Amino acid sequence: MAAFKSFLDNVVRRKTPTNDGSTGPVKGKPVFYGTVPPYPNFNASNDAAVLKSAIESKGVDEDVINAVLVKRNNEQRQKIKAVYEANAGKKLEVALKKALKSDHEDICLALLMPPAYYDAFLFRKATKGVGTKEDVLVEILATRTNQEICEIKKVFKEEYKEELEDVIKNETSGDFNKALLAMLQANKDESNVVDMAQAKKDAEALFEAGENTKGTNVSTFIDILTTRSGPQLAQTFQQYTSVSDNTFPKALEKEMKHDIKHCLMDIVKCAWNTPAFFAEKLHLAIKGLGTNEATLTRVLVSRSEVDLKKIVEEYRAMYGTSLQEHIVKDTSAYYQKILIGLCGAG
């Protein structure tokens, strides 16, 4: 419970928490909360030529490479890749692998992948080799839309010749396995409309499945937490205090153990405030001895056209300093510069 209490204590309190960190639905055209919008006056041929020159120059001009990749959105980067290959006779990714190294190479290659391909790559990386990175699997499945999850499954099959469901079955087990497979079904309600009667009914069902029975009916927890929308779950968590002396996170902490507890707790955090969930992820990647560059790269790349602006705002509200300041303290050189560029102004 300490981890979730710390999360809630750090999050800016709102009367009506929503899964995108906003205070309610926005009418009209959706607001862009990313930090990398489409580049105006975009010219793929010019950018491809600039990158070719930067890569082939004596010593490699990393600053130019950063400037192009960070200031073009993913759709524009795909066009640059196509023109580069047509003109240079080789893939841009291959050229960058030879020109760059370490974390800087990793993040540049990540920026060149279409979102679904990057997520499929992350799944492969998290399940291949010794050990499984459970937190990465949960992070992706808990924060992607139904359509995005379907696309990830399709790309994974195309790229790695395996069904993602089969990989999850082989690499995980028990209730954790059931929760991941449930999220892979992509059946989450994506409406912003909150059904108060359903929230009360779900709160009662969760209470009966956990605190009010001997043992725990984990299936009920998985079913509700993986199929309801973020706003709906947030209301359910509030309703839970009317049927129990405990908050829902505290009850979850008492009833669950190991991987399934962490999985469901992450779903709760995302339902409460997705940008705050990612802000906490970034903070944990930076604080203490050592830096988890893989997490920094994964979050900043995957959220740069989704909600990174909100994540940066939540980070400052939660930790009293800017994400950029912490990045400067814990990273260096061109990798640091590209991270700062992705964070945007501020």
Image: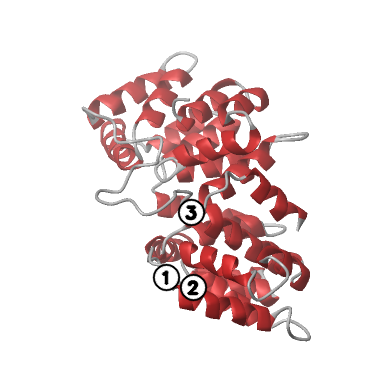
Q: Secondary structure at mark 1?
A: loop
Q: Looking at the image, what colour scheme do you see?
A: secondary structure
Can the viewer see residue 78 in this picture?
yes
The residue under label 1 is 189
Residue nearest the observer in this picture, 117 or 278 = 278
Q: Name the side, left or right, on which 276 lies relative to 20.
A: right
Q: Amino acid at mark 1?
A: Asp
The residue under label 3 is 119
Name the N-terminal-most of marks 2 and 1: 1
Residue 275 point in image, percent of width and height: 52, 47
Contact, mark 2 vs mark 1 (Cβ under 8 Å):
yes
> What's the distance in space between the residues labelled 1 and 3, CA to CA?
21 Å
The numbered dot on residue 319 is: none
The residue under label 2 is 227
Residue 226 point in image, percent of width and height: 53, 71
Q: Amino acid at mark 3?
A: Asp
Point 47% across, 34% down: residue:
108
